[in-house]
Amino acid sequence: MMRGYWSIFYKEILHLVRDPTYLVIALVIPMVQLTLFGFAIDFDVRHIATAVVDLDRSPESRRYIESLRNTQYLDPVALPATTDEAEDELRSGAVRVVVIVPPNFERHVLGHTVPQVRVLIDGSDSQVAMRAQMALLGGQRYRFPAHNIKDAGSGPGVKRLDTQPWPVDARVDVVFNPSMRTQIFMIPGLIGVIMQLVTIALTAFSIVRERELGTLEQLMVSPVGRLALIVGKVSPYALIALFEMVTVLYVGWTVFDVRIAGSVWLLLGMCIPFIVASLSLGLLISTFARNQAQALQFTLLITLPSILLSGFVFPRETMPGAIYLLSHVIPVTFFLNILRGIIVRGAGFVDLEPNFAALGVLSIVLLGAASARFRKTLA
Amino acid sequence: MHAIEAQGLTKRFGSIVAVDHLDLRVERGSIFGFLGPNGSGKSTCIRMFCGLLEPTEGRALVNGFDIVRQSEEIKRTIGYMNQSFSLYRDLTVKENLVFFGRIYGLSGGRLRARMAAVTELLELGPYADRRAADLSGGWRQRLALATALIHEPDLLFLDEPTSGIDPVARRELWNLLFHLAAQGRTLFVTTHYMDEAERCHTVGYLYLSRLIACGTPAELKALPCVSQTNVRMVSVAISSPALALAVLQDAPFTRSATLREAEVRLTIPTETPDSAVIAALEEAGLPGARVRSVEPSLEDVFVALAEEAGREDHHS
């Protein structure tokens, strides 16, 4: 039964050594992914982008804002003047939390009463929302460090405040997905990841198949234009992707009760650069993969980081700098912002413009790179 | 105007020279046989002629168009048939023809007329609605030829068109090629079959990236390195040719020895008589040999050319 075992074993080792792609897939990729994901995945969300509307503009309110930063969980990145502006930032996804400090904040502190702040939390990413909620509700125990109110203790009845903890009453409202349902968080993300996977795989496979069959060469000796060839080959898949998008949205709505808060047409329009970028990635893979098996491996290689780094499951807030930057070359990262923006928060075009622009740039760069390489591999 | 005219055509991939200063002329309406071992640069040549690959050096005209500057014009006037069946297997015969016809800009009545013409020529009618995947090897090649002919190309490149098909289909395909040549089309054929090379009007032999011989089969057989003045070629008929080959390979008079059609083919000095060959075999216990003089075949030509080129390479 086991006769010939060692010769087969030895032969397999020879295959591995001779074809470096196998070795790369077997050794390098797991190492890269381990490091990448080991650093990227951190459930302890920190540095949540926060907008603070300071209506009091007093030393005490500034001190309170500073104490929020000191928690490490919230990162006051914007100080809009009005609540409306802050809400816009929340809708666009630029910040996840809005803290509104009322005009009477310092008076409350000096008058020994508990000041109230209003907090709006974006519930479209339930993990981030949960962490922000915890951080702010815990805020009641915050100490006001190193008080140096000039006339503290001089007036009658005024206690020294410098070492005292002072409670703050945070009234938290989870806006957008207030019930913090997991489906509302997961399904928009799932749409993006599925769309990217399907589009990349369909494109890469259809081209690699023609290369394997030799029909691509047959086309190259014909007067068919290069552009006509590329566009003609990928546009049916773009249409399939669009159709799939509509189907998934419909299923999300009917089966999982994920309603689209914003405009469906805006969503369909904004997914075009995403589809172009994904098709280009597929095209790019087809220039590297020699056969369909390799095309599948390359597709998985792109899909895994897309799932882990795009913010689909794991909040991007926790990712270290380099990996955070890396997440910007993945089309689905921006598309997730658009999906969650329109579906959960009802965001409009202006809110999501940066994501749309980023996707546009990404799709042009990827399409350019893919066409250049495609042209080269044909000759 | 020649169908193909190349001067000093060279292609280098990095430090590797794939085609080395090729000079070639292919007459219109002729069948040109392009031969050479695998990896000798045949495919690279064809790819340059088709305008797929730019030469590193030299120039070439195909159907009067420059291969670098006018590759688009070339593509309209050539047909290309690959050794591997490179059509869509999940499409029917008809769908393949329509697709390639449209790719070449045919439509409407013109497309219908051309489809009817190639279908009739290649007798594909009964198979029109069959998927290409369900055709046998010979019929697949017919379909491939039909698609290569759909736009009436003046020049047809056929890269090992008969590899892997049965002898009957092979003969039928060649009859078609003769028919096409008679219509004035030029056929540029690569093959490893010597009998196919014999059928070509002109034969070019590419060896180690260089075209080391080019001419009619008769001209090649008369080359000095093949028909050397002081040697002759004999065929030895004997009941056990394999044993005889082993004996004769070690005989002092043998220049080269091989088996062909169950006989031993020998190159021996002119002064060595037939009787010396018979004697050598009898001495080894192999009686009953009959020796006759033969003309060199194209196989002998290419072996002789390769040996000579190898020797030159060795010296330089």
Image: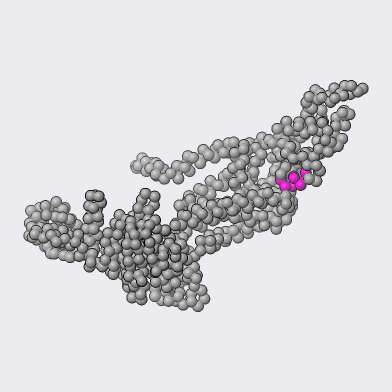
Left/right placement of residue A255 relative to residue A199 reads: right
- Magenta stretch bounds: A86-93
Q: What is the basis of the colouring in this image?
A: one colour
Residue at left offset 70%, top offset 54%: A253
Residue A155 picture location, percent across and down: 91, 23
Quadrant containing the C terminus of chain A in the rendered view: bottom left
Q: What secondary structure is the magenta-colored segment mainly?
A: helix
Q: Quadrant of residue B200?
A: bottom left
Q: Residue at x 39, y 58 (%)?
A: B55
Vertical arrangement, residue A278 with respect to residue B7, above or below: above
**Location of residue A107 in the rendering, given as x and y in whole percent from the top left corner:** 88, 32
B4 shown above or below A121: below
Residue B143 falls within the magenta-colored stretch: no
Near-viewer residue (A190 or B62): B62
Q: In the picture, which quadrant includes the N terminus of chain A? A: top left
Residue lying at 85% horizontally and 25% vertically, measured from the top left? A150
Left or right for B262, reference A83: left
Q: Is residue A180 above or below residue B165?
A: above
Quadrant of the rendered structure where residue B76 is? bottom left
Can I make out residue B311 in this image?
Answer: yes
Left or right: where does residue B78 sit relative to residue B105? left
Q: Residue B149 lies in what quarter of the image?
A: bottom left
Residue appearing at x 51%, y 41% in the figure: A29
In the rendered view, tell whether residue A11 sits above or below residue A273. above
Residue A138 visible in this rendered orientation of the protein = no
Image coords of residue A332 (percent x, y) = 62, 49
